[in-house]
């Protein structure tokens, strides 16, 4: 094992990340992105259903992604998760969390994702690699190892550090490294916290409000941010090149609205010019305008996978579904006010849904297709043609999909 790899492994043995208490699984499920089952169906399977999904979580850490996906698959009654991580301490925590939940659909393995090509495992339908590739000496080699065990029509959910949102991190890492030398881990951590506290207010790290959770949080998070022995950050353009080098194409960044430059521009001409750019350039422009993206969460499929990715248009057979929210709750909120507020890319934005949105949202139960929702509205007395319904749904979708609240999942486009 190379010295750099040994240092990375030692860090996660000493500070399993993120810091989790297995007993908490008795009263809550941590959900997020990537690897939420509905997101996989939307961004990888073009709205199709993921029956019997075989998933790999490569570099699973203390288990957030693996536990979430395994629980969602267990609730569906099909599918399995394979967990792999080089940290025995992290694996033990993830395994304990699964035991508290009684999950029997996870297999745990101790090892490096770089060894995947030699593991003689059957290819996976879906691979999660969240916050791992940017810690490798050669991220491209890690990505190649992942794709070596991915089925042709499969996809990946990834997270890489964002360069602009981590402004101040790398000068601070270098400053800390000059002082900690070869001190023991606990002494280095204490010294690093003291150094950050002593930094002047004008220091870029102290000015970066987007990193406050790690700076003020637990030791594992602080260590991961400022005492890591190896990490790098990416711009959107660089991520696209990395994916292309592995024969992959990005199907979407999350939340989608944060990567829409129109969310940061009020000038009509600037918005029009931005809208005319190719998709990748729009994503990159949004990152440049925001300046707040400290991580990039995204999905990718093979370049030759023409049926994977995100479905286009609104076919009548497509099944919309709300993520993390019941239709009753959202519809009741929209009945009171058609407006929503949310933070995208570090900026607070206001959204307004069209008249009649509550009636449509109330029917989005994750089982009804668009055709069935339209039929229910007409049966209830709404004089709404399909083109009119499609236009109204599109307006709703534009807002809620931007916030990753409305997806297509569990059905097939016609």
Image: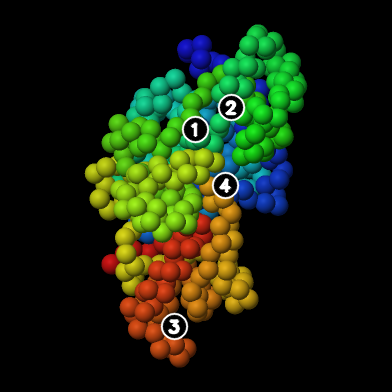
Residue drawn at the location 67% of the way across and 47% of the way down: 25
Q: Earlier in the sequence, mark 3 or mark 1?
A: 1
Categorize mark 2 by other alpha carbons within 10 Å: few (<14), some (14-19), many (20+): some
Where does label 1 land, which residue? Answer: 163
78 and 210: which is toward the camera: 210
Q: Which scheme is used to colour this image of the protein? A: rainbow
Q: CA distance from mark 3 to mark 1?
A: 47 Å
Q: CA distance from mark 4 to mark 3?
A: 39 Å
Q: Secondary structure at mark 3?
A: helix
Where does label 4 land, which residue? Answer: 346
Q: CA distance from mark 1 to mark 4?
A: 15 Å
Categorize mark 3 by other alpha carbons within 10 Å: few (<14), some (14-19), many (20+): some
Labelled pair 4, 3 in contact (Cβ < 8 Å)? no
Q: Secondary structure at mark 4?
A: loop
- State left or right for residue 290 relative to residue 98: left
Residue drawn at the location 31% of the way across and 39% of the way down: 248
Q: Earlier in the sequence, mark 2 or mark 4?
A: 2
Q: Nearer the viewer, mark 3 or mark 1?
A: 1
**Of the numbered discs in the image, which one, if any, rests on residue 169?**
2
Where residue 28 appears, as percent x and y from the top left, is 67, 51
- In this orientation, does residue 280 appear? yes
Categorize mark 1 by other alpha carbons within 10 Å: few (<14), some (14-19), many (20+): many
Q: Earlier in the sequence, mark 4 or mark 3?
A: 4
Where does label 3 land, which residue? Answer: 376
Q: Earlier in the sequence, mark 3 or mark 2?
A: 2
Labelled pair 3, 2 in contact (Cβ < 8 Å)? no
In the image, is residue 252 above or below residue 200? below
**Of the numbered discs in the image, which one, if any, rests on residue 140?**
none
Q: CA distance from mark 3 to mark 2?
A: 53 Å
283 and 134: which is toward the camera: 283
């Amino acid at each position: 094992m190379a010295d750099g790899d040994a240092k990375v492994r030692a860090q996660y043995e000493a500070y399993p990340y993120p810091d989790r208490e297995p007993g908490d699984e008795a009263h809550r499920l941590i959900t997020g992105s990537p690897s939420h089952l509905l997101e996989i169906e939307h961004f990888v399977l073009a709205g199709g259903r993921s029956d019997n999904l075989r998933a790999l979580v490569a570099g699973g850490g203390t288990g957030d992604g693996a536990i979430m996906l395994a629980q969602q698959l267990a609730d569906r009654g099909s599918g399995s998760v394979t967990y792999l991580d080089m940290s025995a301490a992290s694996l033990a925590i993830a395994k304990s969390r699964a035991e508290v939940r009684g999950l029997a659909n996870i297999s745990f393995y101790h090892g490096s994702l770089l060894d995947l090509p030699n593991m003689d495992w059957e290819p996976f339908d879906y691979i999660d690699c969240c916050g791992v590739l940017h810690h490798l000496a050669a991220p491209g080699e890690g990505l190649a190892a992942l794709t070596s065990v991915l089925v042709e029509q499969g996809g990946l959910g990834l997270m890489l550090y964002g360069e602009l949102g981590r402004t101040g991190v790398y000068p601070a890492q270098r400053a800390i490294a000059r002082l900690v030398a070869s001190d023991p881990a606990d002494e280095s951590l204490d010294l690093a916290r003291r150094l950050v506290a002593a930094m002047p207010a004008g220091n870029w790290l102290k000015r970066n409000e987007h990193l406050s959770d790690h700076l003020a949080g637990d030791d594992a998070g602080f260590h991961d941010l400022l005492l890591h022995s190896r990490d790098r950050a990416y711009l959107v353009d660089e991520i696209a090149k990395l994916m292309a080098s592995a024969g992959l194409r990005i199907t979407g960044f999350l939340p989608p609205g944060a990567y829409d430059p129109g969310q940061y521009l009020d000038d009509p001409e600037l918005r029009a010019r931005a809208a005319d750019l190719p998709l990748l350039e729009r994503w990159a422009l949004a990152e440049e305008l925001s300046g707040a993206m400290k991580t990039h969460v995204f999905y990718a499929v093979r370049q030759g996978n023409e049926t994977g990715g995100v479905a286009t248009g609104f076919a009548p057979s497509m099944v919309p579904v709300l993520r993390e929210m019941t239709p009753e709750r959202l519809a009741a909120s929209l009945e009171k006010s058609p407006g929503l507020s949310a933070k995208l890319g570090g900026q607070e934005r206001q959204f307004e849904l069209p008249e009649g949105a509550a009636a449509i949202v109330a029917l989005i139960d994750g089982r009804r297709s668009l055709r069935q929702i339209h039929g229910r509205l007409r049966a209830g007395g709404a004089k709404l043609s399909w083109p009119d319904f499609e236009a109204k749904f599109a307006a709703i979708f534009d807002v809620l999909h931007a916030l990753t609240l409305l997806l297509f999942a569990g059905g097939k486009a016609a």
